[in-house]
Amino acid sequence: MGANAEKETEPINSLKQAKIADFLRGTGEDITVRFDHNNVIRLSCHCDYDPALKGDRSNQVDLLRKVELQKPDGSWETYPSATWLDGVGGHEQLVTKALVRISGEKAISVMQSTQGVPDGTLMVAAEKAGVYTETIDGEKEDVAE
């Protein structure tokens, strides 16, 4: 096995599993996710998620690059690092939720934009960077990827 092949398998060993409520999709159901808390990407955002990355004219945030959800059969599928929720938690809900690492912390936090002010800047930046996101319309009860 070559050096490149070994490097590709090493990140799997650094994945952390966590049982959390499904805040990003708005269901609140208990789910199991896995991710590497060091695998983040710094992206532009509209909201102030991390005071250390707040700028005079623009903000930034360290977003998880990849998250996986454990399915009932034990296999894994891609889970969003950021979501745009429209009416999922009630008719008036319009927010962005994201899995971020705050400067100086090792843990990953679920952060949310201000109600009524979803973070389109973050969603576009994440999509352009190849980070998996979802837009969920609660009234239509479907997921747009």
Image (cartoon, rainbow, N blue to C red):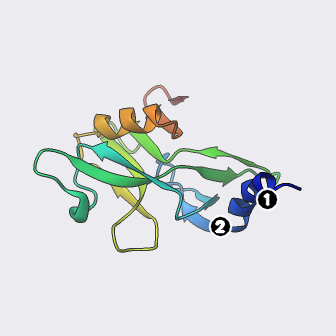
Residue 9, quarter of the rendered image? bottom right
Helix, strand or loop under label 2: strand
Q: Is residue 32 above or below residue 119?
A: below
Q: Is residue 93 above or below residue 42?
A: above
Relative horizontal placement of residue 93, taking residue 41 as reference (left or right): left
Relative horizontal placement of residue 6, taking residue 130 as reference (left or right): right
Relative horizontal placement of residue 118, taking residue 107 as reference (left or right): left
Question: What numbered label is drawn on residue 121?
Answer: none
The residue at which mark 2 appears reads as 17
The three-letter code of the residue at mark 2 reads Gln
**Residue at x-position 47% and y-position 25%:** 140
Q: How many marks?
A: 2
**Residue at x-position 82% and y-position 51%:** 73
Instruction: Tell which residue pokes out farthest to the left in this image.
Output: 56
Helix, strand or loop under label 1: helix
Q: Position of residue 11 (x, y in %)?
A: 68, 61
Alpha carbon distance from label 1 to label 2: 22 Å
Q: Which quarter of the rendering shows the N terminus?
A: bottom right
Residue 32, quarter of the rendered image? bottom right
The residue at which mark 1 appears reads as 6
Q: Position of residue 42 (x, y in %)?
A: 38, 51
Q: Identify which residue, 22 or 111, lies in the foreground.
A: 111
Q: Identify which residue, 34 or 26, lies in the foreground.
A: 34
From this viewpoint, is residue 2 visible?
Answer: yes
The three-letter code of the residue at mark 1 reads Glu
- Mark 1, residues whose alpha carbon is within 10 Å: few (<14), some, or many (≥20)? few
Q: Identify which residue, 137 or 35, lies in the foreground.
A: 35
Instruction: Tell which residue pokes out farthest to the front in this image.
Output: 3
